[in-house]
Amino acid sequence: MFDCRVHGKPVPPDVLGEFRDSTALMSDSSALQSRMAEDGYVFLRGVIGPSPIAMARHEVFCRLADVGEISEPPRDGIFTGRSERAEQDADLGKFWQSISEGPALRRVTHGQEMKYVLDTLFGEPSRGYDFIFLRPGVPGRFTFLHYDLPFFSRGTKNVVTAWTAIGDIPTTEGPLFVLENSHRFDDLIKPIQQIDYNSKESPQVQMMDDAVEFARSRSSKLLTTNFEPGDVILFGMTTMHGSFDNCSPTNRTRLSVDVRWQPASEPVDDRYFGANPAGTTGAGYGELNGAKPLTEPWHTR
């Protein structure tokens, strides 16, 4: 069905499943809400058009090409295996913030198409967090299973993650996956809900276990798809997810971005809003894995 690896191991077909496509429901608030409640996620094809996606991809990869991490032409996203980022810019947080606030990228993350979808899902005007998570995943990288709770729920618990493919992301290049029915794992969710939301510490909510065996232990599957440019998946704070290994044979970098959204009428978590958002720990964009040169390995959330 799909060619996927987790932590260097092939994922057996019996543990894999495909997202349920909700594209036909994109304009129906009640249907989207029902699908979110039932599945813990909503998968939508082609929310963002080809032109804005291509412009955002070019914008990001040109900046990374300038520091030697991406080869020419930048739109192909081919990792060079080297980096001059730290030599060119001593403040890696500011460097990453400048990329994350690029106008073409923000056109994708906070533009009218994305807002329409989130307005529809919430059934009222929505607001996207200013602090975003841009993720260039070079070959060898993956993300452990984790919940987004409690990182973004200090203002309101009514928060949704919007994950967008900035380019095509076949399963061989490490796309996002969701653990089926994980939004119903009360034995895991309830302890996380007790974590102090006012803390600046980043609580450990990752599942370091083997994702395949963990899925089997829960009679669950790892749900994914071959993402196309502009595809979006929305999921709640209590839906467990991760990303497969990027096994690109051509050193192609997987590019995606995730942004939290909430109803505009509800209280906000000030750490993620404003001209210079502090982020979870107070270090701003410097706390993100994206601020590290692409030559540095990481396997985290």
Image: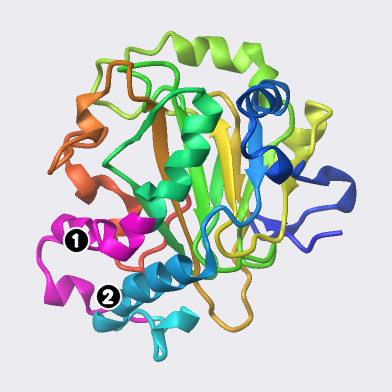
The answer to whether mark 2 and mark 1 are in CB contact below 8 A is: yes
**Measuring 47% from the left and 31% from the top, which residue is drawn there?**
119
- 201 left or right of 121? left
- 147 left or right of 100? right
The colour style of the image is rainbow
Q: Residues within 10 Å of mark 1 (few under 14, many from 20)?
A: few
Residue 41: x and y, percent? 64, 33
**Measuring 77% from the left and 41% from the top, which residue is drawn there?**
20
Residue 86 falls inside the magenta stretch: yes
Q: Is residue 50 above or below residue 207?
A: below
Query: Picture quarter containing residue 17?
Result: top right
Circle 2: element type:
helix
Q: From this viewpoint, which residue is outermost toward the front?
A: 27
- 19 left or right of 149? right
Residue designated by label 1: 98
Stretch in magenta = 82-107
Q: From this viewpoint, which residue is outermost toward the right?
A: 14
- 14 left or right of 271? right
Dominant secondary structure (helix, strand or loop) of the stretch shown in magenta: helix
Q: Residues within 10 Å of mark 2 (few under 14, many from 20)?
A: some
- Determine which of the numbered discs, if any, sits on residue 235 in the image: none
Circle 1: element type:
helix
Residue 161: x and y, percent? 48, 36
Q: From this viewpoint, which residue is outermost toward the left?
A: 90
* Residue 207 in view: no
Residue 180: x and y, percent? 74, 33
In the rendered structure, which amino acid carries the disc numbered 1?
Answer: Ser
Residue designated by label 2: 63
N-terminal of the pair, mark 2 or mark 1, is 2
* Residue 218 in view: yes
Give the number of marks: 2
In the rendered structure, which amino acid carries the disc numbered 2?
Answer: Arg
